[in-house]
Each structure stands twice: as structure tokens, then as C-alpha cells.
């Protein structure tokens, strides 16, 4: 199979005919005396080939052809030759997300801008569109998708089921519900690759990697739903732990608990946009306070070994590694942001007073001339951890956000993995280029999964 791009034009001819420039006929090795099978997404049609005396790669689609395979627009797009007179346009890439109400504007509320960015990154690479579960017509096997015109405005167009779906459903509860699970399974049963199947809970990640020796070397000791006895043992063993909800995000509900012999137990957490520190004389009193506050919700909590991270101005620093699968199905650390915790904060989240730095800025203050070597080691570990998660996860993953820590000896640790990572690190002025690269990697992996590049999956 060969992969090239060509200019798609719309002809007003009503018949099932395509006009193909002679250079394109030669490059695709088409037989103009035989019908051409032309596909887009999961639609296809046979059409008569008429050579066109015109330089360059051009394909003119008649009205009947473009209506049958539901071509959304003219312009530059990939053409994949399957052998003989069999070609495929595309790929057709769908971004699955959600809206508060069907038909609202902008279509995907706060996520509309991100969907726009992915669609723009797909310009001249793919037919890329956003859609919600409400936009699927199962009977017709089509989707009423949201595309962008040349002016950056939304327009709707019915297209065939796509070649690949990038899942950005934003809500954990919605996503794990029976309705959404069945929806994704139905799409997979249609032969459509979906990547980033679902969010990853903290406990799920530790369970996935529990028997992976390569990954375990970089995981802090963690216990899901610990009993009071187990939690006390973990705390006395490591001096401090993090106690956090398994499905939480943005640092909400996280406690840093410290044990100091003869002084007691210290609990630090975020309350009403300020940092709070409580002291308890005994473990039982401390645990009782947590139980009173959270009740049965404590069953969803994870206790995790505290790590003495590198610090700047006596504030701990951790790192977000934004990982992508590329067009060759390999993991790459595309963007890395260093997050310095606010004074007295439990976490490094920006909303809790954290500061965003480049990894070079953070590491040089601790390791000096060794910083480049430490960063390269962390990148290698991040790739190995991503491969381990993928190896042990039952669905496709094409993107991960790894929360990485580096201790004062230079050892690399992973605290969390997110299958639908946020993009706040790309707001740093020195990481804007990486932010654009991140969008390109999403499209490149879509090309791979749709078999337009690298052989497919």
C-alpha cells in the first residue's frame, strides 16, 4: 500500500464518475478502463474513471459519488491505495465527547476549543470532526458530525462511521455507565478502533501493574481501601503518606499525613481554597476524624507511600509527562511540565498555589550539571511505564498523563497515570511548541490506527 495526498474537488456531474488527473492515475497505478472502488470511512462506491489532462494530483468527485460516501468537503486529503483499482480517502477521524444538551452552541461547551484545536491539527491530514453520543444514527450507520469551515466556524455534516475514534468523553460517572459502555462496545463491534477507552482510577493503575516487575520498581507502595491497621503500618513505615480518593482529580480530597514519634499525627489538606494543618495525639483520633468527614467514601481511598521529592524554596516539585503514541505506534514523551507546590500545599496543582516550570528549570536547581542526564533517565522510565500500562490494560490507549516524581537521589517514581490528561502544562510559554506537537501526535496515531500510516493495528 502507498500513501499520498491529493486535491479533492466537487464536480456537478450527476453520474457515478470520478475525474482523475493523469499524474495521479500513474502514481496510483490505476486502470482507467475499469471501475474504481472508492471508500471513505465505512462507505464505498464503484465509479467510472475518466482521465483528466491536468498537472498535479487531483480527484474530481461527481454528485452521486460524494453523496454516496458522504464526503464532507473538498480540499487536500490522503489517498490510500489498497491495490488494483481500490482507493480510500481519509482517514475519517471522529472525536467522541459530550454536551450538556443536544443542539447547544458551542456544541461541546468548554471542550469546544480543544476539539477545534484537534480538527485544525488534522487539516490536510484527515477529515476530522467532533460528535456526541446523540449524533449517532445506528440504523443508517452514520454520524451527524461537527466540522470546521475555512473561517473556523462550525458546520454539521452527516458522514459514515469513521475509520478511528479519539475518545474524549469528559465525565467519569457518565463514561462508566452502562449506556456509554455499550455505545463504545457497539462502535468497536463495527470494526472502529477507539483509543483512550476510559479514565484510569488510581487503584486500577496499581492493580494493573501489580505483577509487572519493571513498573513496580518505580511505584510507591500503595494500598487500595486500607484498613486502619494497614494504614497505621504504612504510616509508621514511611513516616508520611498521601491518602487520596481513587477517582479524584485536581488534588481535591487529598491528605498528606505525617507521623512523628512522640509528637503525634499531622494532617495537611486543602479546605475552602486555603491550606489546613491539623494535629492529633493518636492514630485513632486522626482516623476517626477522617471517618467522620467521609464515612463510607473512605472505601474508595488509596494510601500511598510518601516520597521525599526534590524541592525548590523548600517546596516539593513533581512532573507531568504528557505521553503520546506516534504514527509508528511508539510511546513518546511529548510535553513535560514541572510543578512546584505552593507553600504549605498538599499537592502541586496550579489551583492550589502551584507554579509551572520547565523541567530544565526545576532540575538544574537540584542536580546542576547532572540535570540533563536525570531528565533523559526520567523520559526512558516514562516510556517503560507507558508500555507497561498498555501491556496490562485490556483496551487501546494512545495518550497518557503520568505524574512523575524524582527524589533527591535522582530515582524516578510514578504516582498516577491519567488516560485523558489535561493540557495545563502547555500554557507555559516555553511549552507552547510541545502543545502543538501534542495535537499532531494525536492525528499521527489516528493515521496509524486507521492503517493510513505504519501498517495499522
Image: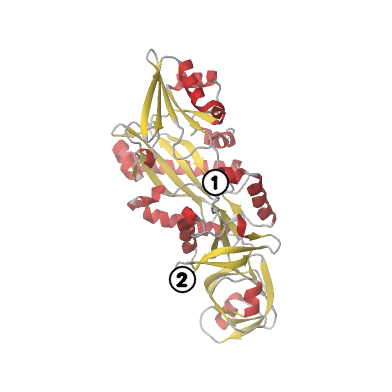
Query: Residue at (47%, 62%) from the top-left corner?
Result: 121
Kindly tell me whether residue 456 is visible in this rendering: no
In the displayed structure, 285 sits above or below 251; it is: above
Along the line of sight, the residue nearer the viewer: 171 or 167: 171
Left or right: residue 281 compared with residue 74: left
Q: CA distance from mark 1 to mark 2?
A: 31 Å
The circle drawn on residue 171 is 1
**Residue 450 image offset from top left, x and y in percent:** 60, 60
SS of the residue under disc 1: loop
Along the line of sight, the residue nearer the viewer: 414 or 3: 414
Query: Residue at (37%, 36%) from the top-left corner?
Result: 273
- Do tag 1 and tag 2 residues touch (Cβ < 8 Å)? no
**Residue 105 image offset from top left, x and y in percent:** 50, 60
Quarter location, residue 361: top left
In the displayed structure, 449 sits above or below 273; it is: below
Which residue bears the numbered disc 2? Answer: 150
**Residue 456 image offset from top left, x and y in percent:** 60, 58
Q: Which part of the image, by quadrant, shows the N terminus?
A: bottom right
Left or right: residue 448 compared with residue 425: right
Kindly tell me whether residue 375 is visible in this rendering: yes
- Residue ranking furthest to the top: 262
Amino acid at each position: 500500500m502507498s500513501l499520498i495526498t491529493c486535491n479533492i474537488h466537487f464536480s456537478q456531474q450527476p453520474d457515478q464518475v470520478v475525474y482523475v488527473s493523469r499524474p495521479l492515475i500513474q502514481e496510483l497505478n490505476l486502470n482507467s478502463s475499469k471501475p474504481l472502488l472508492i471508500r471513505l470511512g465505512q462507505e464505498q462506491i464503484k465509479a467510472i474513471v475518466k482521465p483528466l489532462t491536468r498537472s498535479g494530483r487531483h480527484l474530481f468527485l461527481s454528485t452521486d459519488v460524494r453523496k454516496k460516501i458522504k464526503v464532507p468537503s473538498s480540499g487536500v486529503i490522503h489517498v490510500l491505495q489498497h491495490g488494483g483499482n481500490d482507493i480510500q480517502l481519509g482517514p475519517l477521524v471522529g472525536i467522541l465527547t459530550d454536551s450538556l444538551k443536544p443542539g447547544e452552541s458551542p456544541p461541546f461547551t468548554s471542550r469546544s476549543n480543544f476539539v477545534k484545536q484537534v480538527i485544525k491539527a488534522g487539516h490536510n491530514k484527515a477529515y476530522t470532526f467532533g460528535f456526541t453520543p446523540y449524533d449517532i444514527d445506528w440504523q443508517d450507520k452514520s454520524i451527524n458530525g461537527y466540522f470546521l469551515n475555512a473561517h473556523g466556524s462550525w458546520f454539521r455534516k452527516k458522514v459514515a462511521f469513521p475509520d478511528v475514534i479519539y475518545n474524549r468523553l469528559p465525565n467519569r460517572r457518565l463514561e462508566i455507565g452502562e449506556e456509554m459502555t455499550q455505545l463504545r462496545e457497539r462502535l468497536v463491534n463495527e470494526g472502529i478502533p477507539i483509543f483512550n477507552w476510559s479514565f484510569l482510577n488510581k487503584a486500577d493503575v496499581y492493580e494493573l501493574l501489580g505483577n509487572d516487575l519493571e513498573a513496580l520498581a518505580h511505584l510507591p507502595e500503595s494500598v487500595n481501601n486500607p484498613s486502619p491497621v494497614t494504614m497505621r503500618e504504612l504510616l509508621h513505615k514511611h513516616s508520611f503518606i498521601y491518602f487520596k480518593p481513587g477517582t479524584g482529580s485536581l488534588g481535591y480530597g487529598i491528605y498528606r499525613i505525617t507521623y512523628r514519634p512522640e509528637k503525634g499525627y499531622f494532617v495537611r489538606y486543602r479546605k475552602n481554597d486555603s491550606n489546613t494543618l491539623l494535629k492529633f495525639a493518636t492514630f485513632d483520633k486522626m482516623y476517626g476524624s477522617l471517618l467522620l468527614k467521609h464515612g463510607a467514601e473512605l472505601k474508595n481511598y488509596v494510601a500511598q507511600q510518601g516520597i521525599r521529592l526534590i524541592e525548590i524554596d523548600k517546596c516539593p516539585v513533581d512532573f507531568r509527562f504528557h505521553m503520546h503514541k506516534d504514527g509508528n505506534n511508539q510511546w513518546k514523551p511529548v510535553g513535560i511540565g514541572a510543578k512546584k507546590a505552593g507553600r504549605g500545599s498538599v499537592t502541586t496543582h496550579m489551583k492550589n498555589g502551584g507554579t509551572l516550570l520547565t523541567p530544565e528549570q526545576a532540575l538544574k536547581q537540584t542536580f546542576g550539571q547532572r540535570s540533563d542526564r536525570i531528565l533523559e533517565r526520567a523520559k526512558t522510565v516514562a516510556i517503560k511505564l507507558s508500555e507497561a500500562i498498555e501491556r496490562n490494560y485490556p483496551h487501546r490507549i494512545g495518550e497518557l498523563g503520568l505524574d512523575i516524581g524524582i527524589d533527591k537521589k535522582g530515582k524516578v517514581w510514578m504516582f498516577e497515570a491519567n488516560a485523558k490528561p489535561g493540557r495545563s502544562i502547555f500554557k507555559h510559554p516555553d511549552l507552547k511548541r510541545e502543545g502543538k506537537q501534542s495535537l499532531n501526535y494525536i492525528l499521527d496515531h489516528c493515521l496509524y490506527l486507521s492503517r493510513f500510516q505504519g501498517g495499522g493495528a
